Amino acid sequence: MYKPVTIKDIANTLNLSCSTVSRSLRNGYGISAQTVNLVKEYAKKVNYRPNPIAVNLKSSRSHSIGVIVPTVADSFFSQAIAGIESVAYEKGYSVLVSQTHEMPERELDIARNFAQRSVDGLLMSMSSGTSDYSSIKNLNNAGLPIVFFDRTAEEFKTFTVASDNFGGAYNATEWLIKAGRKNIALFTNVSRLSVTKERLSGYKKALKDHQIAFRPELINTCGKEMCDYQQIENKIKKLMAMENKPDAIFITSDQISLYCIRALHNLKLNSQELMIAGFSNSDVIDLLEPSLTYIRQKAFEIGQAATEMLIKVIENDSSVAGFECRLLQTELHIATQKIAS
Amino acid sequence: MYKPVTIKDIANTLNLSCSTVSRSLRNGYGISAQTVNLVKEYAKKVNYRPNPIAVNLKSSRSHSIGVIVPTVADSFFSQAIAGIESVAYEKGYSVLVSQTHEMPERELDIARNFAQRSVDGLLMSMSSGTSDYSSIKNLNNAGLPIVFFDRTAEEFKTFTVASDNFGGAYNATEWLIKAGRKNIALFTNVSRLSVTKERLSGYKKALKDHQIAFRPELINTCGKEMCDYQQIENKIKKLMAMENKPDAIFITSDQISLYCIRALHNLKLNSQELMIAGFSNSDVIDLLEPSLTYIRQKAFEIGQAATEMLIKVIENDSSVAGFECRLLQTELHIATQKIAS
DNA sequence: TTGAAAGCGCTAACAC
DNA sequence: GTGTTAGCGCTTTCAA
């Protein structure tokens, strides 16, 4: 087994006691400068590093944070995790990652497991299935700091970092309207999610501000069951068979945006017939055919901000006065028009 | 602070000693069935879970594995991590993830940090900058199990899981040849990487088997410095200005594949003029314009296989006789021809 | 200025 | 059958 140098090893070699070595290495309080130097130099020489597990056991602090996301294999989440990891690394924290696959039981199981491993805090993006937050809330009340990012939990107020989903949706919808579209269908994720609600509000507000009637029959909610490509294609076919059929689609989810593009592609519908706008963090979205006007979230920055916030909470657990909620702006990218009109 | 139930709590409540409780909870060896039941039931009732940190300290086993990758925000790696996490979760291991950003110093630092945290093993995909494996090798020799995935380290033989890069490259190149292309340029990552070498070999072999001369002037190595889009575009421009210019490009890297597509798109080169084939694990690659014939790696499965292998090594550290090396087949996806010829 | 000892939660060798 | 004890590596009183 891998067997690093311990404080005891140093103490033996230098003919000192463990406590002297320990104190020399930490603050050096009450130890002669000579001894401190001796110890420090020797420690550096043998590349001594304190065993974090032992430190944890004493302090109940592990210098690690747990990240709980629906899935890692997703452009938004992988970018966010990259941001999380960057800040964590810089500040000396390890990052534990686990996926819920949108299952509430797993989510809770993972959170408990992380808590047991003495993570110092949790970064969570809620699974779409979760409706009962009480257990998570219990962990939080028991002293485990939690920061929600992207998919926040309205039901219990704590620290959050997310995109301005309302604004992003509003702007994109307005853009469709200004492009002359009046019958804008909506594709959306389960309505339980905070992001879904906010984006839906943005869409409705934009319609209202432009005196366009909201038509419930144009709303398509996916993912109550597993949301797959075929489901989306069918819904689009059905929409296009309507009497008063839509001339545009607004999509509130990354995954569904890609499915829609694929469906339009397969159904040979061009942007002229059916203009599309939606959220996406894919890094090649601008090369897709048909082209999408897309709202991009600052995923990396959201990860960074959430991590900074969490570490701040962890490191001065005194000031749990007000809950900070950061909102990052989204970016609207207009699709280049490739269709000759 | 979050304060879970300890063995001591149970012992006190039940008027037993710690060791009795401990043994009841583990094997129950030498304890009356009655006591075992009593303890187990009470433990379940209060939702007792052993403190993993304390267990680790005793056993130097943490039931966690470290994953070291260049970056998380990449389709191949995020898919692989999803696979890793799935298997790990199922087998009760936690997953620590850290990114090297292709920097050897970071890689080593992360590996050491993980080792200190008593991860039970490491899953690594080497950074492109690494040329000296001795420190990693030391960790491994000191008893830390390591499985390499995707980007393996030829210099030291251990357990590996990777794609059949040679075969994938061979097939793709051959496909270009059969499509009538004779001047096939190559875009490739730094030549230090195992995957690069293997893919290059596949390319060369295919040329040779079809009696096409290898033309060194068509080889473009990127990423000695940071590889960015502009670099790729410039190289393509330069290629297309050649007298005997290429009629196809074969690309050995996911990232560069995307850059090439973007460049052809911007330079308005279509597949007829310049046919492209390359590695990619993007899930929307088939919707990109111009279209790419792509080799897809079984990223998720590679992650799974590597994790299974690692856990097997961890759990019977006796049999370190032969090093297992798994090779997963790649899938060749032919671009649908959209150009009227 | 330094050392001895206890304890974080758990396990295992050794008593009883 | 069950309890006592020591120890994993480290920190932190308390004594010297």
Image (cartoon, coloured by chain):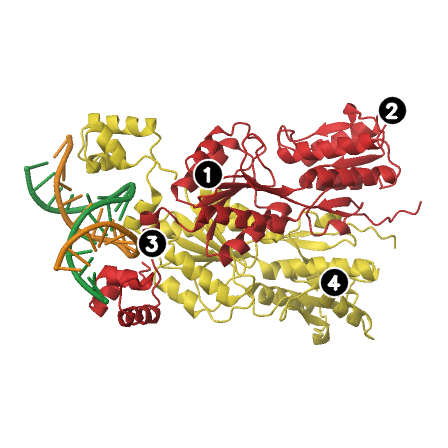
Chain colours: A yellow, B red, C orange, D green
Q: Say the numbered circle drawn on residue A177.
A: 4
Q: Do labels 2 and 1 share a chain?
A: yes
Indicate the chain on which mark 4 is placed: A
Q: Determine contact: label 1, label 4, CB under 8 Å.
A: no
Relative to residue A10, is residue A132 drawn left or right?
right
Which residue is located at x 70 percent, y 75 percent?
A216
**Label 2: which residue?**
B243
* Whether residue B327 is situated above or below residue A113 in the rendered picture: above
Depth check, mark 2 against mark 4: the one in front is: 2
**Label 3: which residue?**
A317
* Callout 4: SS: helix
Q: Say the numbered circle drawn on residue B110.
A: 1
User: Label 2 neighbourhood size at 10 Å, few (<14), some (14-19), many (20+)?
Assistant: few
Q: What residue type is labelled 1?
A: Ile
Relative to residue A135, is residue A235 drawn left or right?
right
* Callout 2: SS: loop
| Residue sitting at the far right | B341
Q: What is the C-alpha distance between the residues marked 3 and 1?
A: 28 Å
| Numbered circles on residues, count | 4
Residue A109 appears in view: yes
Q: Quadrant of the C terminus of chain B?
A: top right
* Callout 1: SS: helix
